[in-house]
Image: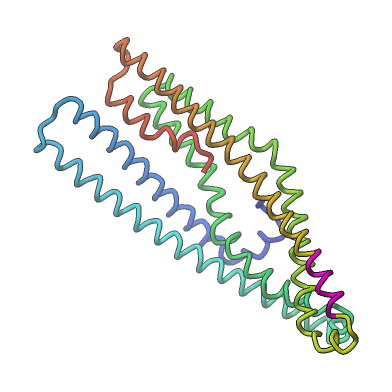
Amino acid sequence: MYLDPRLWAFTKGVRGRIALSVIIGLAATVAGIGRLALLGWLIARVFQGAPMSELMWPVVLIGLVMIARGGLEYLRVMVAHETAARVQLVIRKTIYDKAVDLGPAWFGRERTGDVILSVVDGVEQLETYFGEFMPQLLIAVLTPIGIFAFVAFLDLPVAAVLVGAALIALVLPVAFHSMDRKASLERARTYADFGAEFLDAVQGLATLKAFGQSAARAAALAEKAAKLAYGTMWVNATNALGRGITDAAIAIGAAAALAVGAWRVEAGTMELSTLLIVLMMGWSSSAPA
């Protein structure tokens, strides 16, 4: 997916809710960072031989932070889906008004399957775009910056290693973005074509049988279905390749940060508790989210 200015125009009147969803998402991210930092500090205290009585309050605090993060995530999802529903309502009203302007004569010249697929399935698929993708896009941009700032405050050399891995995880998959986008658009066109053909065939099944064309239409649908399946597998393959690059960068970055951190702890220039906190947060700073 990408940010389409044509779709953004439909968010007029609900952009405040999108901003609210972003704020809630960032608050949930901060709670997640706090949870990881507390876990790292708690593990460090265990290694240092702290008694159980001193570990109870950190455990309770971690539990409260986890509950708070879960509540924030639930609230974000509810706000996002409500926002998406409002935008979909605006889009449907726009489509209806346009249909009224075009009049029955225009629809008489168009395929029923194309129109129905666009009005129903096309609008429904936008729920993920408006409810999840748009808020998460801003969260994904802001979160690594905040994490790096926090890790840099703890230890700058290790933070530099993590940010290098984060840049690799962000930049390298872009090399496959154009190919993935082209394949995705082609798959979307194939899906729309197949859906329209299938709906038209079902609606005109009696006519096809009357003229002895049902077998020919079934063969044509089978060919389009095979093309759709191939396109879907290609999109999944390119997505998996990009994800593989990201996961490799995360693993390599965490391993490099562990090596640098262990060397600094051995040299006495870094506390063990700091290293554990950084390592607990390492996957978050490397992931593009």
Left or right: residue 182 compared with residue 50 = right
Left or right: 137 in relation to 213: left
Query: Is 215 contained in the magenta span?
Result: yes
Q: Residue at x 69, y 68 (%)?
A: 122
* Residue 198 locus on image (x, y percent): 76, 74
Q: Quadrant of residue 135?
A: bottom right
Residue depicted at 44% across the width and 52% down the height: 25
Looking at the image, residue 242 sits to the left or right of residue 208; the answer is left
Residue 205 in picture, x, y percent from top left:
80, 85
Main SS of the magenta part reads helix
* 210 inside magenta stretch: no
Camera-nearest residue between 158 and 238:
238
55, 23: nearer the viewer: 55
Rendered position, 104 above or below 18: below
Residue numbers of the magenta segment: 214-223
> Please, is residue 180 above or below residue 208 in the view?
above
